[in-house]
Amino acid sequence: MSFKKYPISDEDRKKRRDTDSVESNDIGTGDKKSVYQIGLYNEVFWLREGRKDTCNCYSFACNISVDKFTADPGYGYRDNNEFLNSLLDLEEGIKQDGLVKILDGNPVEQVIGTIDKPSWKVAAFYWADDEHRLGYHFFREITQELNIAPHTFFMSRWAHKFHKNQPTSKKHNGVGYITNPEDEIKSLPINYARGQAPSLLGYYLVKPDAYICTPG
């Protein structure tokens, strides 16, 4: 099977992300001290030009829109482009695409995002469904405007896009906004295997030069 890689250039990367309005944050210490960006939430971007139907949670989290459903982690690196069959596939795919895991508050390697070439912070979860296939879901840290006249505040939150649905920063129960993805994942209507709750795979930084792939 063939695959298509996104983006194809720095200019293409800019067109495929949902915002250029970002603020920088430090994370980690010592030689692993890194810088990532939190972007202003732009739900409308994902509803235009067919993106709602072509972009999944991984595409949204990496902030790289794609032209064809679906972007699985590591799709362009696995033999025969097979679907994810194991936790090892998922972890290796995330790594190959250019995501760096955060352990005990430190990225395992230094990542330096900038305003022009941002890095994003994401949360990854996994589970097995009733047919023992591996499932996954991603969230991205965002900032959102809160207008209380005459003031405007910017609130740190998390957002996600479930399959072909529109993205959201609101809790599934409709009460408030997502401030903790580890709590929110438990409320989503996902076909978990009997007795198996979703597990946190970890938090990651999406490197400024990360790539994702879809079927060709």
Image (cartoon, helix red, strand yellow):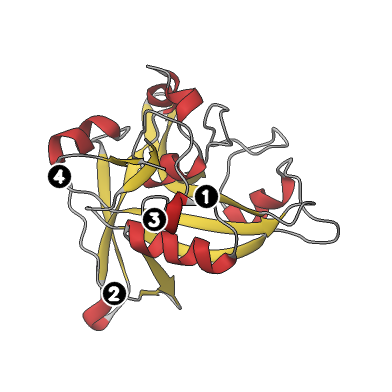
Mark toward the viewer: 1 or 3: 1
Q: Amino acid at mark 4?
A: Asp
The quarter of the picture where residue 65 lies is: top left
- Pointer 3 local density, CA inside 10 Å: few below 14, some 14–19, many at least 20: many
Q: Secondary structure at mark 1?
A: strand
At 47% across and 32% down in the image, what residue appears?
A: 69
Direction right: furthest residue: 194
Q: Which residue is mark 1?
A: 138
Q: CA distance from mark 2 to mark 1?
A: 21 Å
Q: Look at label 2 and name its amino acid.
A: Glu
Q: Which mark is residue 109?
A: 2
Task: Say which residue appears at 63% left-offset and 37% top-offset.
Answer: 176
Q: Secondary structure at mark 2?
A: loop
Mark 3 sits on what residue? 121
> Which residue carries the number 4 mark?
116
Residue 86 picture location, percent across and down: 59, 64
Q: Is residue 155 visible?
A: no
Between 158 and 56, which is closer to the camera in this rendering?
A: 56
